[in-house]
Amino acid sequence: MPEENVVYIGNKPVMNYVLAVVTQMNSGTSEVTLKARGRAISRAVDVAEIIRNRFISDVELGTIDIGTEEIRNMEGSNTNVSAIEIQLNK
């Protein structure tokens, strides 16, 4: 999947990410992947649900991958962080 079809979910307001996905879908992209880690996972789910229920009704959920990523923190030790990828198909 091309990297430009990926929306990374972070700490911005949910509607910023909704707008990013809707813009991509309206410009002809048929699938967009939401990627999030840690506390942003619930925000990614919110984005997917808002798009499906309020903005683009013919969007369907594709694959949903969950996993764990290892991140090196400031002290040099590794920390496990949950990650999710939600695929949205038009």
Image (cartoon, rainbow, N blue to C red):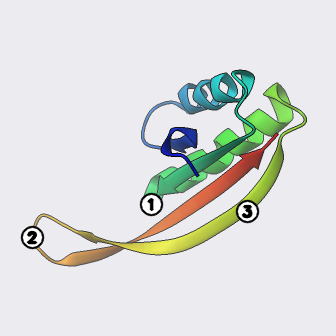
> CB of mark 2 within 8 Å of CB of mark 3?
no
Circle 1: is it few (<14), some (14-19), or many (20+) Cα within 10 Å? some
Q: Nearer the viewer, residue 51 or 59?
A: 59
Marks 3 and 1, Cα distance to the nearest angstrom?
19 Å
Q: Quadrant of the C terminus?
A: top right
Q: Which residue is mark 3?
A: 63
Q: Quadrant of residue 16?
A: top right
Q: Considering the numbered disc 2 on the image, is that residue within a helix, a strand or a loop? A: loop
Q: Which residue is mark 2?
A: 75
- Residue 79: x %, y % from top left: 29, 75
Tell whether 41 sits left or right of 86.
Answer: left
- Residue 74: x %, y % from top left: 12, 64
Reply above or below: 12 against 19.
Answer: below
Q: Amino acid at mark 2?
A: Glu
Q: Considering the numbered disc 1 on the image, is that residue within a helix, a strand or a loop? A: helix
Residue under the image location 83 percent in, 29 percent down: 56
Q: Amino acid at mark 3?
A: Thr
Q: Tell me the number on the disc at residue 74.
A: none
Q: Considering the numbered disc 3 on the image, is that residue within a helix, a strand or a loop? A: strand
User: Residue at the front extreme?
Assistant: 2
User: Residue at the right extreme?
Assistant: 58
Marks 2 and 1, Cα distance to the nearest angstrom?
19 Å
Tell whether 58 sits left or right of 50.
Answer: right
Q: Quadrant of residue 50?
A: top right
Q: Amino acid at mark 1?
A: Gly
- Residue 6: x %, y % from top left: 54, 44
- Mark sitting earlier along the chain (2/1): 1
Circle 3: is it few (<14), some (14-19), or many (20+) Cα within 10 Å? few
Residue under the image location 59 percent in, 48 percent down: 34
Q: Which residue is mark 1?
A: 38
- Mark sitting earlier along the chain (2/3): 3
Nearer to us: label 2 or label 3: 3
